[in-house]
Image: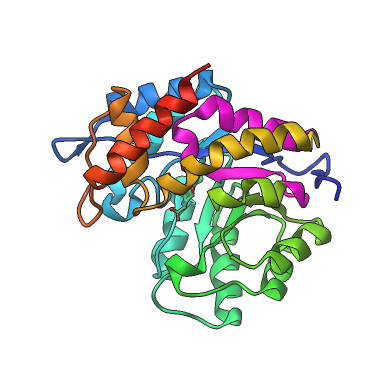
Amino acid sequence: MPQQQPSPDTPDFSGFWVALVTPFRDGAVDHTALASLVRRLADDGVTGFVPCGSTGEAAALDETEQLAVLDTVLGAAGGLPVVMGISGYHLGKATAWARRLSERPLAGLLVAAPHYVRPSQAGLLEWFHAIADASSVPVLVYDIPYRTGVSIARETLLALAEHPRIRGIKDCGGDMAKTRAVIADGRLQVLTGEDHQIFGTMAEGGVGAIAASGNVQTRRFVQLVKLLAANRLAEARAEWQALQPLVELLFAEPNPGPVKVLLAHAGEMRDELRSPMTRASDNLRERLVALDARLNRP
Ligand SMILES: O=C(O)C1=N[C@H](C(=O)O)C[C@H](O)C1
């Protein structure tokens, strides 16, 4: 299947985006470590950055902290695009937040379905329309039913594609038929948000990924996505077969515990999370470090 192409007047979200972790030091956001991480990822060739997603432990950051994280990322990104995560279940708060965030020089907002309340599909349309109306930057819809409790139906996604600011989807929907239908429709750019689906979704015509895994082994993930975008499937498969065991370990316990193990092991930050998120177990830690070392061997 050919890769989706953006039309000339629409923004292009294709490529490899990193869902950033938020480093902590003694309970506070470690802005020095965050800025260094963003600069290193930029050097490693990522397309752009997504702060304040689930990987960024946004649920444990208040609004002031989230804005500070965003400003650090914008300041360190060296002109690379930044898409800010939004989640919640209070529509008035979410629209006000979208309005406020889109005063910043963002490439877009990544908006999750409302969590916990489990609205109807009509309610989901209202949620995304209201936030996209409030935003002055493009919106990516985040379909992640196992976190929000509600699945965005294929028909709802296609209806959302009619909104001029809704331009793409971060797909963790777990339904390849739905993914395929959105790709075939062609109006929303499809980025996988499931790290273990990078190969499959891009081979089916998706344009890229937003992935937590890429905080580590970044050059290899960037190369994988470039090979897939160029339809060099045999080379991409070889790279994917090398990376896939790492992806498995990185999600063997709740994200971002495992990825923080490797970032801390590399001296990039402390291995610290905000409760109720916890550090990875000692057993997983050992396996991660050993596998990462193997991947680093020439
Ligand atoms: O933070 C994100 O955005 C991501 N979330 C997924 C999750 O943990 O649910 C994983 C993905 O790699 C990035």
Q: Is residue 206 left or right of residue 54?
A: right
Tell me which colouring the rendered structure shows.
rainbow
Give the x, y percent position of residue 33: 30, 26
Q: Is residue 66 above or below residue 297?
A: below
Q: Which residue is the extreme one toward the left?
A: 26
Q: Which residue corresponds to the image point at 16% horizontal and 40% vertical from the top-left?
A: 27
Can residue 153 be seen here? The reply is: yes
From the viewer's side, name the closer residue of 175 and 85: 175
Q: Which residue corresponds to the image point at 39% horizontal and 75% vertical from the top-left?
A: 116
Q: How many marks?
A: 0
Q: Is residue 218 above or below residue 9?
A: above
From the viewer's side, name the closer residue of 259 and 244: 244
Q: Which residues are magenta?
A: 203-230
Can residue 114 be seen here? The reply is: no
- Residue 227 lies within the magenta run: yes
Q: Which residue is the extreme one toward the right?
A: 2
Q: Is residue 90 above or below residue 135?
A: below
Q: Which residue corresponds to the image point at 64% horizontal and 49% vertical from the top-left?
A: 191
